[in-house]
Amino acid sequence: MDTVRMAATKILYNVVTNGAWANVELAQILRKENFSDLDRKFCTELVYGTVKTGESLDWKISKYLNRPLAEVDKKILAVLRIGFYQIFFLSRVPNSAAVNESVELSKTFCGIGASKFVNGVLRSAVRKPHKSELPTGDDINSLALRTFHPAWLVKLFAEEFGLDVTKKILLFDNTDPPLCLRVNFLKTTRENVLDALKTFGIKAEASTLAPEGIICKSHGALDEFQLLRAGLCQVQDESSMTAARILNPVAGEFVIDCCAAPGGKATHLAELMQNRGKIIAADIHEKKLKHIRQNAERLGIEIIEPTAIDARNIGKKFPAQADKVLVDAPCSGLGVLRRKADLRWKKKLDEINKLPALQEKILDGAAETLKPGGTLLYSTCTILRRENQEVVEKFLATHENFELAEMKTLLPHVTNTDGFFYAKMIRRN
């Protein structure tokens, strides 16, 4: 039995059936299994590719069934999804291998009785691939199927950005994201890390957007990445690195990161402060604070105080005390869809519509912590106006002692980074 395909099938089943996150499940399996680099890459491609194609893959499968998709056993469906992804989206895998390995896999994963059904469906797909050709039109449903996004999301983007820009965003979401590293200037320099990466055979280049950023074009298993383990760098996208730079903290200041877990931006703030001053890294979830502590310890940072608190109430605990405040707000995450293959299928429109009210309350609470003359930075990893500009406009309309200093949206297809929004505001008095 092919252990790589079996691992990918189990992950997919847990993602679809039990609501697990693909990146978390994949990381756990890759730590457990002794796969070669080639097998690791194949397993990763199967998991992320199958999850990403989601409803479009199911649409193709349904064209070869004699029953509704909902009536197919979920374990059998997981095997079919892995098989169909190889047949239609992995040209380097021979169809015969995709079919035969899926049939063998089904015997173990689903039971002997399932193999005949799996064999019939997959062979039908190989014989008649034209039956499930994705539509070429530019109507919402056709565009959704062809670009592997839910129709409601394509409609939402089209209403906000227009059809041409929406197409570019959707296509960008399906590109492979590079590994981005933030160099820890407390311990080393970007040049030293680039030289070290080169000696490890990793293709990398300096970011043009972030002074501490490095973009890796290829890399092996992160668990064995000594530079990370030694705290010389931190995984973080280029666009996310801009937040700390824009807030621009200096050594000795009192800074609050209101929604800090897992600590990427908080540790960046500490590095810019030369590990001098004080940072409250707040999060509403007590269990997430350990990730902040672990990241700070690995990076050699001592000025971060992880604090369990609801950001909506943080002003009551630290009234008018902070020099700088970061609100990296909970958001829909629609700017990071290329990195999180399953996020596009997990999000729901009604959930997104509820977020601005929460974001506004967090921003209100954060504002209370600032000294006169202090700086408040609001940021998200979404590109929707309702979570970004409209939240800021409403805040400014109800807080006359704040003025907008800078505001910008980084659209992913334009900057070739994760989507990102920030608004920098100053408290006058």
Image: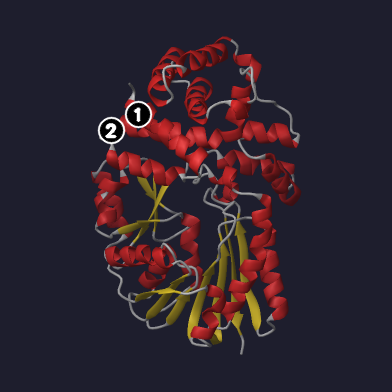
Find the distance from the CA under tag 1 to the CA under tag 2: 8 Å
Res 400 → quadrant: bottom right
Instruction: Check the image and report above or below for 212 versus 321.
Output: above
The amino acid sitting under disc 2 is Phe
Q: Is residue 287 above or below residue 307?
A: above
- Would residue 197 appear left or right of 379 to someone viewing this image? left
Q: Quadrant of the N terminus?
A: top left
Q: Is residue 165 left or right of residue 123?
A: right
Comes first in the chain, label 1 or label 2: 1
| Residue highlighted by disc 2 | 35
- Choose between 314 and 222: the one closer to the eye: 314
Residue 428 location, x and y as percent? 62, 87
- In the rendered view, does 327 fall on the left or right side of 223? right
* 260 shown above or below 220: below
Along the viewing direction, whichever of 301 and 53 lies nearer the viewer: 53
Q: Residue visible at 57% across and 41% down?
A: 172
Residue 321 x %, y %:
49, 87
Image quadrant for the C terminus? Answer: bottom right
Residue at mark 1? 4
Q: Amino acid at mark 1?
A: Val
Mark carried by residue 213 = none
Is the residue under label 2 in contact with that under label 1 (CB below 8 Å)? yes
